[in-house]
Amino acid sequence: MGNNVSSRLVPAISEAEQRVREDLAAAYRLVALYGMDDSIYTHISARVPGTEDRFLINPFGMLFRDITASSLVCIDLDGNIISGPPGQDVNPAGFTIHSAVHAARHDAVCVLHTHTVAGVAVSSLACGLQPSNQWALQFHERVSYHDFEGIALDHEERVRLVADLGPDKRALILRNHGLVTLGRSVAEAFILMHNLERACRVQVAIQSSGQPVNPVPPAICEKTARQYESGDTNRLPGAADPYAREWRALRERLEPAAATSFRD
């Protein structure tokens, strides 16, 4: 990690960055609300608009339910803290994973990583994610795998992680570890993770039953994945982001759910 910036001066924040900060804080709180957090561990990052080498991430030690727009830390790809609340730092493992993805995938506005029971369970299965349910079919032939190399503290692992992720996948299963999603917006990264998590939960439930799985033909798997990708049935009129309708509803759910707002 780079050295902390002693003054931690907060530069003027553009309207675009403020929107990203609010979306990112909302994503943290939604992860907590849906039970996808892991104490103070795992991370969600978002690229600072107009930059290629700076992104926002949570201060290490704060619960996801308490994250606000102003509590986020801005760091660069070398781990230097650019700005943030005084006395805060970031999780070194978070820096390793997120800096690797942001550096290699310029389409990755947001990167979301979880350690849920269902996600870790599926990541630990030799068969990986199976096309056993509608949520899983969103990721048909669209998920990559990266073998476990220990806690993600070794910066040399970044090269292998990026190679396994590939140039266009938006979901990555870290073997024996957890799940990662990439989004062209915070909304996309969160909703992809929400669906991937539910796919894993359903798979674990099915496998626990011991009953045979009803197979879905490969052509239908691909058709379903393409239907998800188009987003046509969910798109708000005039909205470029097909996830905008669901994201608006999710953000509205947060407003009465906490004493402090994610917007602060």
Image: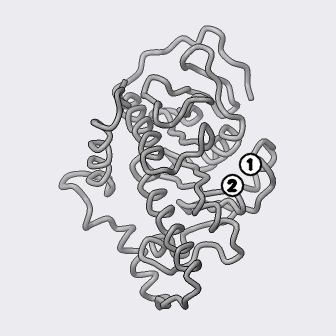
Q: Position of residue 42 (x, y in %)?
A: 61, 44
| Residue 166 visible in the picture | no
Q: For residue 55, which quarter of the picture?
A: top right
Query: Mark 2 Cα within 10 Å, few/some/many (few <14, many 20+)?
Result: some
Image side of residue 96 versus residue 137, left or right: right
Most foreground residue, 52 or 215:
215
Question: What is the number of the mark on residue 158?
Answer: 1
**Residue placed at 18% from the left, 55% from the top?**
237
Provide residue 211's location: percent of width, then percent of height: 55, 89
- Mark 1 closeness class: few <14, some 14–19, many ≥20 residues within 10 Å: many
User: Residue 34, how many percent across, how many down?
Assistant: 44, 51
Name the amino acid type tagged 1. Answer: Arg
Residue 254: image quadrant is top left
Badge 2 vs badge 1, beta-carbon distance below 8 Å: yes
Foreground residue among 139 and 151? 151
Q: Quadrant of residue 222?
A: bottom left
Residue farthest toward the top in the current orientation of the protein: 7
Q: Amino acid at mark 2?
A: Val
Q: CA distance from mark 2 to mark 1?
A: 6 Å
Identify the residue at image location x=51%, y=75%: 140
Residue furthest to the front: 209
Question: How many dots with numbers?
Answer: 2
Point 47% across, 40% down: residue: 28
Viewer can see residue 238:
yes
Q: Position of residue 46 (x, y in %)?
A: 50, 39
Q: Residue at x 70, y 67 (%)?
A: 124
- Tell me: 239 left or right of 146: left
Instruction: Find numbered disc 2 in the image and state the secondary structure of the residue it sits on.
Output: helix
Residue at image mark 2 = 162
